[in-house]
Amino acid sequence: MPLKTFRQAINDTLVQEMQRDVRVILIGEDIAGGTGCEGDGDAWGGPLGVTKGLISEFGPDRVLDTPISEAAFMGAAVGAAMNGLRPVVDLMFNDFVSVCFDQVCNQAAKCHYMYGGQNSVPMTIRANTGAGISTAAQHSQSLHPVFSFFPGLKVVVPTSPYEAKGLLTTAIRDDDPVIFLETKLLYDMEEDVPDESYEIPFGEANILREGGDVTIVAVGRMVHVATEASAALARKGIECEIIDPRTTSPLDTETILESVEETGRLVIVDETTPRCNFATDVSAMVAQEGFAFLKAPIRMVTAPHTPIPFAPNLEQLYMPDPAKVSAAVQQVVGYQG
């Protein structure tokens, strides 16, 4: 299989789905970069270069560069989806959802239900998420818990190029609105990815590492942080089972509970701030459904309850890292080394 970056895997998926289905269109700011201006009409391809080259193949009728108005182009995408198209919307930073919150969470999420199933909203909203490249407090949040709050939205957080391609394919073909969150620090990650199209189903977690001492549930880039920590912990004789939920809504609670039943211990790693986040959601679910399995209190490794710093040194302190995960695991297993 060819080696591809996270960015290339998403671009490949968009090309394949647009070739397969003429109803798939792209909407967003700067997704062609410079269209309508003198000079290169494909100058940028989005803020991180993901959509570069697509307007050259599919033209401006299917790759729509929009004005700087998230409310306008998100509303247009909802209407397009309700009328037979399958838009893929580039929101850029997931933080920008605050500008089009009504269109996403009050319209797209609810239309299928409110029309009694007579209409669907088959749209995919791509957005980058997470800290780590000093984009400061307004461009670095991880908002998967916010999106997961709303029934009607499916929320996907891929962890690798292979996962990104399979999950994005599923998202575009889904008849419900899907939030597809791409962690900024993963765009240059490389992995073997098939050229051919494939789907990864929603609501099915991936067990990346098996172990009998403690269950670690992590989301997005935090899966890699947990994996690095688990390798160091293994040298101390502590074996971790690592679960990547892939989707926070729907959430594969069964796999998490089965793992906790085996290990008796749970650590959740989530880059978001600690109040009302994914870690608290999983903690509450396990406390309610699997309390009898627990041999130790649940531990959450999260960012602090503060806006994300711009300064690189403070940003690194803000984010969960392998040392923080390792400390939490050692605490729940009572390691005294």
Image (cartoon, rainbow, N blue to C red):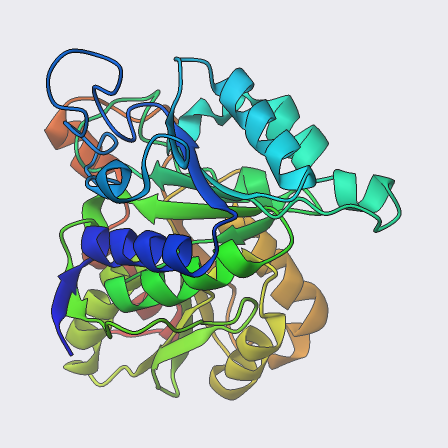
In the picture, residue 224 is in which quadrant? bottom left
Q: Residue at x 21, y 50 (%)?
A: 7
Q: Nearer the viewer, residue 188 or 243?
A: 188
Query: In what quadrant of the picture does the C terminus appear?
Result: bottom left
Residue 244 against residue 314 in the figure, above or below: below
Locate residue 94, reporting x and y percent.
41, 32
Q: Residue at x 35, y 39 (%)?
A: 129
Q: How many marks?
A: 0
Position of 87 with respect to 167 (left or right) is right
Q: Nearer the viewer, residue 284 or 8?
A: 8
Locate residue 88, reporting x and y percent.
46, 42
Query: In what quadrant of the picture does the N terminus appear?
Result: bottom left
Q: Nearer the viewer, residue 283 or 176?
A: 176
- Residue 314 visible in rendering: yes
- Residue 326 visible in rendering: no
In the picture, residue 192 is in which quadrant? bottom left
Q: Residue at x 84, y 48 (%)?
A: 118
Locate residue 268, reporting x and y percent.
43, 60
Residue extending farthest to the right is 116
Q: Residue at x 42, y 75 (%)?
A: 206
Locate residue 75, reporting x and y percent.
60, 24
